[in-house]
Amino acid sequence: MIPVILASGSPRRKELLGHFGIEFEIRPSEKEEVIATDDPVEAVKSLAKQKAEDIFSQTTGDCIVIGADTVVANEGKILGKPKDEEDAKRMIRSLSGHAHQVCTGVMLLIRQGEDVRRRNFAVETNVHVHELTEDQIARYVAKNESLDKAGAYAMQGWFAPFIDGIEGDYFNVVGLPIARLYEELLTEGIDLYQ
């Protein structure tokens, strides 16, 4: 088995990659992330690439490095992590009552001998949110779940009751589109599922 390195410290990505039943190393990139575009899909592909390339440059020998990044986009604008509780409330308010997009970009860097292969892709999922009252927004933000999340919410957490539905990959919203990741690796002749 080729050593697998997850270039992310996200506990959600760690859990999702664990569904393959493999051992992997976690080595988060410390490199400052630079977003050079307003397009959510291109932004996450670029961010995932930056993380993966940073860790890949620090490795030797055969390996698979997986970089990933997720953003929430509302009306074409990227919503990052909120600065504080008021910013979190503003973001949740903007999502209330309609659909938005969650985009996760993934970069795979595969080294086998002298051969290096790259696969960079993004998956987009539409998320529909109930109309929320100011009280519901305040109570959710008070749960202290939103400050470290893109778009100020975690679908798999306290925000779950406010989700009307999704169109696309649930795991993409959580932070790693594992089905697409598996497909991309199979295309490269690698089957990680154990």
Image (cartoon, rainbow, N blue to C red):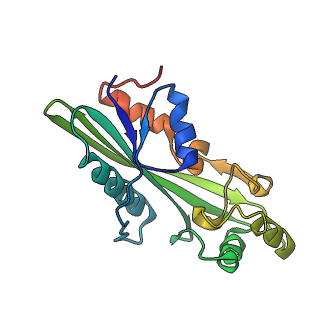
- The quarter of the picture where residue 94 lies is bottom right
- The quarter of the picture where residue 47 lies is bottom left
Name which residue lies at 60% across and 55% down: 126
- Residue farthest to the top, as pictured: 194
**How many marks can you see?**
0
Name which residue lies at 78% across and 68% down: 142
User: Residue 123 location in percent, x, y?
Assistant: 47, 49
User: Residue 46 location in percent, x, y?
Assistant: 34, 59
Q: Nearer the viewer, residue 164 or 109?
A: 109
- Residue farthest to the left, as pictured: 114
- Horizontally, is 191 left or right of 78 in the view? left
User: Residue 152 location in percent, x, y?
Assistant: 64, 66
User: Residue 130 location in percent, x, y?
Assistant: 78, 62
Q: Nearer the viewer, residue 81 or 99?
A: 81
Name which residue lies at 45% across and 64% down: 40
Name which residue lies at 78% across and 58% down: 162
Q: Nearer the viewer, residue 63 or 47?
A: 63
- Quarter of the picture holding the N terminus: top left
**110 above or below 29?**
above
